[in-house]
Amino acid sequence: MGALFLAGAALADEAPTQAERVQAALDGWLAQRASIEGVTGIAAYVSFASPGPNIEAFAGRTGHGADDRLVDQNTLFAMGSTSKSFAAAVILLLEAKGQLSIDDTVGKWLPKYPAGATSASGASST
């Protein structure tokens, strides 16, 4: 009985896993910042360069109502203004590979969009 008690005590004192620490950080951020930032839910994915488990963590809901879905791996988020930064980075990578030029018009690649606007002008607008 004494050995069983010691094993149970040792398990109770184990440090939280990396995934548990990420989840706790998300939960804490959401609890502290949700009303200030106007955020109802958050998701994080941490990928490690070395082999091993990646971390997915989710907190909150998709809206303000109690009947709104919990945020999970299938939740889609609107990117808002941040998508321009990602698009600019991709455009610059493609230019570095010689696959396009930042002076190409958007219409060259996406015919439904204005022919006069360039990738560079779109990336630098506010």
Image (cartoon, rainbow, N blue to C red):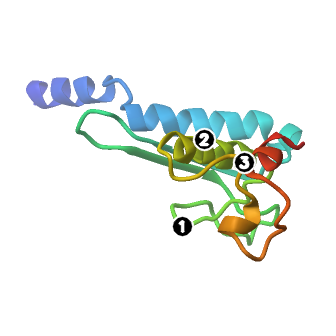
Q: Position of residue 125 (x, y in %)?
A: 87, 43
Q: Residue at x 51, y 61 (%)?
A: 73
* Residue at which label 1 appears: 74
Marks 1,2: beta carbons within 8 A: no
Determine which quarter of the picture holds residue 114.
Answer: bottom right
Q: Quadrant of the C terminus?
A: top right
Give amino acid for label 1: Asn
First in sequence: mark 2 vs mark 3: 2
Query: Label 3 vs label 1: CA separation?
Result: 36 Å
Q: Residue at x 68, y 34 (%)?
A: 29
In terms of secondary structure, where does tag 2 sit? helix
Front of the two marks 2 and 3 = 3
In terms of secondary structure, where does tag 1 sit? loop
Instruction: From the viewer's side, name the closer residue of 90 and 9.
Output: 90
**With 59 as the anchor, is 12 left or right in this view?**
left
In terms of secondary structure, where does tag 3 sit? loop
* Residue at which label 3 appears: 103
First in sequence: mark 3 vs mark 1: 1
Determine which quarter of the picture holds residue 35.
Answer: top right
First in sequence: mark 1 vs mark 2: 1
Give amino acid for label 3: Asp
- Above or below — where is 24 with respect to 91? above
Q: Position of residue 123 (x, y in %)?
A: 77, 44
Q: Residue at x 54, y 67 (%)?
A: 74
